[in-house]
Image (cartoon, rainbow, N blue to C red):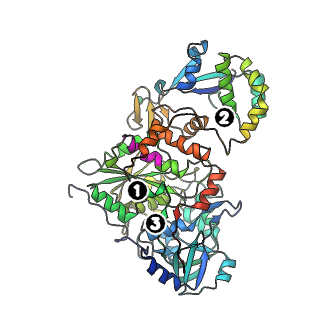
Amino acid sequence: MAHFLVILLDDKRFSAIKGTEIEEKVSNLFGGALKAINVEVPEDAEKKIMETFTSARIDSRGAITDVPIAFTRAIFEEIAAQKSIGAEIFENVFSKIEEIKEAAAKESSCLPPPDIDISDIEELQKHPYQGE
Amino acid sequence: MGVFIEKPLPHGGRLVERVVRDPELGKKMAKMAKAVYDIKPTLHYETGVPVRNVYREIMSICYGFFSPVEGSMTKAELERVLKERRLLNEWVFPYPMLFDISEEDYASLGVELGDRVLLRLKGKPFAIIDVEEIYRIDPADVATRTFGTPEDNPEVVQQAFDKKHPGWVIYRSMNPVILAGKYTIINEPKLRPPFDRFWYPPRKAREEHVKRGWRTVINHQTRNVPHVGHEMLMKNAAYTGDIEPCHGIQVNAIIGVKRRGDYPDEAIVEGHEMVHLAGYIKPERHLVTICLWDMRYGNPIESLLHGIIRQNMGCTHHMFGRDHAAVGEYYDMYATQILWSKGIPSFGFPKSVNEVPYGLQIKAQNMAEFWYCPHCNEIAYSGCCNHTKEKQKFSGSFVRGMVAEGVFPPKVIFRPEVYKVIVKWWNKFEYPFCNEHYVQEKEEKLEIELPDMEI
Ligand SMILES: [Zn+2]
């Protein structure tokens, strides 16, 4: 059986593929609180992944794990753009692999933070219960 | 037996407090010093990376977290601690506390017995040590005996300690010359924000408990931003108490040298604070505190120190999970729970730490794990939920992977407000975990600021 990549979907990611055929492939984790798609990886793409990212490994479920976050992010972006989880996704992502490798090299020291609004907690922190 | 549990006395009977609050008196005491020594971080004996800073031990000793210890141990005391986990005054104590310097520094300091040495931190006067004894150690020997061996401690030690263990590395990396003697902080420091509002040294913690009307207080040890599994552990463990559940839930975060991949200390303390700011535990029942210590990851040995710190802070109970303060598989995963329930004879405890003479009074609440169960539709206690096939564990690597990917975690894993605290510090440090830059900067800035003091 072919191996697969697990792409986690939060609400933002899920809304990008909602209503497309991919939605049927979405599985539920933590009682539906977290969603994921298992993207089947064609054999030649798997070979390339393993060659490009030495940290990558295949776990007991058959999932390819420990790939750089930049790579997983690029895969998701491609899925959202193409509305597909077919083999062409990997071809497109591998066409810009140099860029991804560059971002991956920086991952041990730098990761772009998610773009979310945290003003609600900053407001809460203005009135701490502890301290003077 | 009474109905109510009483607040335990400090370990050793009274709190050690060795901080001079009057700057004039501090100056006077510092002037009597024969030599001046600039505190340096302990560097990894092979890689040169900082693994410890003795200033944290001086802080924890002088503010009473480690009562009844008052300073750097003499040779006889070190031997007793390594053999029996006891001080010369009989009280149980787990770890060597040593002020170590290199042969070169010893030669240039020129100190003798009875001398006072002024210790500077970041170039400023900080503390003094009154030298009672000068001796040498073999750091590798101290390291190995501190944690035990499979031969000498077969009950719980499964594997010989080596350089993959960060606590063993701390002792292995120490300098060979030990100055033994009492410490006194002569220039009172201020904790840097955000640590200042979590700074509750034992006397202040005890006063705070009384002010809040807490008779019983259970402590939660942490080195993590709390996920919902941690929160459930705290809340459920707190149902123990006396005739009522514990009045207070105290979180005590161990703040010290970081390893790459840990969460930043700022996110840890503010993440715990967010649990009450966002209302998941009432703020009046929840107190977030810190203790400065470069964690040794000594599982049962570390649990003794944790018990001592929190008893000194006035807690009546302490939660212990599986693999408490553990790394790797050096110890049996239940070693801490074994120590607190029936003892570990080879470490000097034929009975529970609570039942030996000069032992601890704080009570252990040994807990199993929590997981998410879709069938129970809750964060379930492993002792209750029997849906072993459906359960989903809070695997640390899964949670960290999800965070790194920037995926907004589901509510059953992280409270959204707590996750946003991670993002707040991620924005600042450009990384959700401790990277090399963070580790370096932290060891330069440390957690305190010292006022100027001319001597
Ligand atoms: Zn269940």
Q: Residues within 10 Å of mark 3 (few under 14, many from 20)?
A: some
Image mark 1: chain: B
Q: Quadrant of ligand 1?
A: top left
**Residue B332 in view in this figure:** no
Q: Position of residue A36 (x, y in %)?
A: 57, 24
Q: Amino acid at mark 2?
A: Ile
Q: Where is residue B163, by image quadrant?
A: bottom right
Q: Position of residue B450 (x, y in %)?
A: 52, 68
Q: Which residue is most to the left?
A: B2
Horizontal side of B283 relative to A108 (left or right) equals left
According to the picture, the residue beneath numbered tag 3 turns out to be B348
Q: Nearer the viewer, residue B219 or B160?
A: B219
Report the predominant secondary structure element of the magenta stretch.
Answer: helix
First in residue order: circle 3 vs circle 1: 1
According to the picture, the residue beneath numbered tag 2 turns out to be A69
Magenta stretch: includes residue B52: no
Q: Which residues make up the magenta segment?
A: B270-280
Q: Amino acid at mark 3?
A: Gly
Q: Is mark 1 within 8 Å of ligand 1?
A: no
According to the picture, the residue beneath numbered tag 1 turns out to be B340
Query: Which of the two marks, 2 or 3, is nearer to us in this view?
Result: 2
Q: Residue at x 47, y 69 (%)?
A: B84
Q: Where is residue B362, by image quadrant?
A: bottom left
Magenta stretch: includes residue B279: yes
In the rendered image, the quadrant that contains the N terminus of chain A is: top right
- Which SS class for mark 1? helix
